[in-house]
Image (cartoon, rainbow, N blue to C red):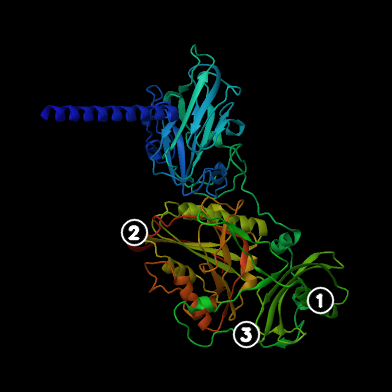
């Protein structure tokens, strides 16, 4: 019996041994099939490669001993395997999440790393002359670009693979000379992990000069990093927007492997005219004054009793518009079918045209044979079933004598069960009001703060609008010289305050508002992670009415991996984080609730809405076309960077 037990035990151990041996060999074969061998990459941080001033530290690697490297830029929180989601990301290619370097193109990444993109770039300097072709394999999507010299603009696509594919470019060779440098750039995009948890990228090469024509790993001693991806002479033709450079400028040259950030597109000419009406000068004020008889404006929905906490969410109402803005947005979901969130409510065309006819008729009576009507730009209806309807009417006119194209933009009111229009008392918008844009920024938000400055600079350059201020309160942890960035941004008027303490958004916004001393100017609470349309300032002005109306535009919250060029997401109906009103009204309602929301963020926008409505105002709600919010996590945004309650710096170039 004992002998039989020993035999069974030995047999069991033998079977277990062969099973383990089989699994080990199978795993090894799979690794060879994926990347021709096991090799785990550990990216080296760029700080080890670059000195403080951004120049290459010659002692950090040695080309002789095989310590060559390429620059690596990493972008996180971009979903999907498609490279276009990386190329169209607004912070690509010069504002990555982190900067690192690599000495190998045989890259195995952590299995739990997902939804990221890589830009690997620098120079190849082969040791032997010959015609080279390349072998690519990748668990994501990868493109290999190589230039005929050191100029990135002369790059050509040498190969590309999609998820879990291998590619060999036997027919696409490039001649490389020994000792010469050739710019190389590799773009890699990886989405979610699959069931095998593969996360790799491998590039090999083959030269006609080799006796044995097999693909080999690219050795580190032929890799040379870009001296500095911001200051190198190689990039002298390209103006960059980057964190290390701490400046905001527009890129004049787009490299072949990247994409041009596209301008907003429009479905119809009507939509385009509405979005670009800010180009038109206004008709003379004397031609609009007393156009209709005055009438009292006191909507039935104005709150007259105290509200419970956050009850304002059920007291707001929405505006309908004509012409249709085609602002519907598709939202994708893994759990259910796709569905659409609709744009602004569409005003009945016949009703809109009747209002326009009445306005146009009255204009002709007041200023006969002075104008012709060219286009209906925009009609907005704020419906009150109990008392009547408020309209914003905007028309493109042609002045007959000068042939100039001009803009009419005024509020009118139609009492209930009446066909006549009147001018609502104290409901008029100031067409030259100064808009003060309030922003608080802190932990890990440096890249997006520069993106915001870039957009405000673009708006100024496009519209030639000087009547706005950017007021930024900076807390610890953004790692960007905002003072220098503001100087170089081209924004005409700004204020900057640097606080050496941890991020407190409500307090920062209130400090920014305190900088505004003119009660007859507008304050607008701004957020980051946005693409802001050119018509933003014009929209804010015409929807803020002193003592009467605050404005909270709706934005499109993009899904992870979606961009402004490929918008997938939804209209943020319940978000009131963007809010504008006159400074006198801001002071009257008490501004930000700094005491309650000192160390938290969430609900403060609803709380301020409660106070706006209880102070007898209304909140205009419109879906602002081309206002996009990019997906991001809140990781690190509320970490305690430090807590030194000290005002250390301020910059003032302010429109008073």
Picture quarter with the C terminus: bottom right
Q: CA distance from mark 3 to mark 2?
A: 46 Å
Q: Which corner quadrant of the image does residue 328 belong to?
A: bottom right
**Quarter where residue 113 is shown:** top left
Numbered mark located on residue 342 in the image? none
Distance CA(mark 3)–CA(mark 1): 24 Å
- Indicate which disc, 3 or 1, sits on the residue closer to the N terminus: 3
x and y, in percent, of residue 340 in the image: 60, 61
Q: Secondary structure at mark 3?
A: loop
Q: Are marks 3 and 2 in contact (CB under 8 Å)?
A: no
What is the spatial separation of the Cα atoms under label 2 and label 1, in whole angstroms? Answer: 60 Å
User: Which secondary structure lies at badge 1?
Assistant: helix
Mark 2, residue position: 640
Label 1 CA crowd tier, 10 Å (few <14, some 14–19, many 20+): few
Q: Does label 2 or label 1 sit earlier along the sequence?
A: 1
Disc 3 marks which residue?
299
> Residue 357 shows which numbered tag?
1
């Amino acid at each position: 019996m004992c002998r039989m037990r020993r035999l069974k035990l030995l047999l069991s151990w033998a079977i277990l041994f062969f099973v383990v041996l089989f699994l080990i060999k199978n795993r090894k074969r799979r690794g060879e099939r994926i990347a021709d061998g096991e090799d785990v990459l550990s990216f080296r941080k760029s700080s080890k490669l670059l000195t403080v001033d951004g120049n290459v530290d010659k002692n950090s690697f040695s080309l002789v001993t095989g310590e060559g490297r390429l620059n690596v830029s990493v972008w996180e929180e971009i979903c999907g395997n498609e490279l276009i989601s990386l190329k169209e990301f607004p912070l690509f290619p010069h504002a990555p999440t982190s900067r690192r370097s690599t000495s190998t193109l045989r890259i195995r990444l952590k299995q739990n790393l997902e939804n990221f993109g890589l830009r690997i770039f620098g120079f190849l300097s082969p040791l032997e002359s010959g015609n080279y072709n390349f072998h690519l394999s990748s668990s994501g999507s990868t493109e290999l670009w190589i230039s005929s010299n050191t100029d990135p603009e002369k790059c050509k696509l040498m190969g590309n693979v999609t998820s879990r594919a291998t590619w060999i470019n036997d027919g696409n060779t490039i001649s490389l000379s020994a000792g010469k440098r050739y710019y190389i750039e590799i773009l890699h995009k990886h989405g979610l992990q699959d069931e095998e948890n593969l996360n790799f990228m491998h590039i090999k090469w083959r030269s006609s000069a080799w006796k044995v024509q097999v693909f080999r790993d690219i050795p580190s001693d032929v890799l040379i990093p870009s001296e500095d991806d911001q200051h190198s002479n190689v990039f002298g033709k390209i103006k960059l927007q980057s964190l290390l450079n701490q400046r905001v400028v527009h890129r004049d040259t787009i490299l072949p492997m990247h994409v041009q950030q596209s301008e907003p597109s429009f479905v119809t000419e009507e939509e385009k005219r509405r979005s670009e009406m800010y180009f038109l000068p206004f008709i003379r004020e004397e031609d609009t004054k007393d156009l209709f008889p005055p009438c009292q404006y006191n909507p039935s929905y104005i709150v007259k009793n105290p509200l419970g906490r956050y009850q304002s969410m059920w007291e707001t109402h929405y505006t309908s518009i004509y012409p249709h803005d085609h602002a519907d947005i598709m939202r994708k979901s893994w759990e259910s079918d796709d569905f659409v969130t609709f744009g602004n409510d569409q005003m009945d065309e016949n009703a809109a045209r009747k209002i326009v006819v009445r306005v146009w008729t009255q204009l002709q009576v007041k200023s006969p044979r002075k104008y012709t009507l060219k286009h209906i730009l925009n009609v907005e209806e704020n419906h009150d079933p109990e008392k009547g309807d408020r309209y914003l009417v905007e028309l493109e006119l042609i002045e007959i004598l000068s042939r100039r194209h001009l803009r009419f933009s005024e509020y009118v009111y139609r009492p209930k069960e009446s066909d006549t229009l009147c001018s609502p008392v104290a409901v008029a918008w100031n067409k030259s009001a100064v808009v003060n844009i309030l922003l608080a920024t802190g932990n890990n938000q440096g890249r997006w703060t520069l993106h915001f400055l870039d957009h405000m600079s673009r708006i100024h350059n496009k519209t030639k609008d000087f009547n706005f201020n950017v007021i930024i309160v900076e807390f610890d942890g953004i790692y960007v010289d905002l003072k220098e960035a503001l100087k170089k941004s081209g924004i005409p008027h700004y204020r900057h305050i640097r606080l050496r303490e941890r991020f407190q958004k409500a307090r920062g916004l209130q400090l920014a508002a305190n900088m505004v001393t003119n009660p007859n100017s507008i304050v607008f609470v701004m957020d980051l992670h946005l693409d802001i349309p050119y018509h933003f300032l014009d929209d804010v002005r015409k929807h803020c009415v002193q003592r009467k109306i605050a404005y909270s535009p709706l934005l499109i919250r993009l899904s992870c991996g979606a961009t402004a060029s490929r918008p997938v997401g939804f209209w943020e109906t319940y978000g009131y984080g963007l809010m504008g009103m006159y400074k006198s009204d801001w002071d009257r309602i008490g501004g930000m609730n700094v005491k309650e929301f000192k160390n938290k963020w969430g609900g403060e926008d609803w709380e301020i809405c409660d106070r706006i409505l209880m102070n007898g105002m209304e909140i205009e709600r419109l879906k602002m076309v081309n206002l996009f919010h990019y997906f991001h996590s809140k990781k690190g945004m509320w970490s305690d960077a430090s807590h030194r309650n000290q005002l250390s710096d301020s910059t003032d170039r302010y429109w008073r």
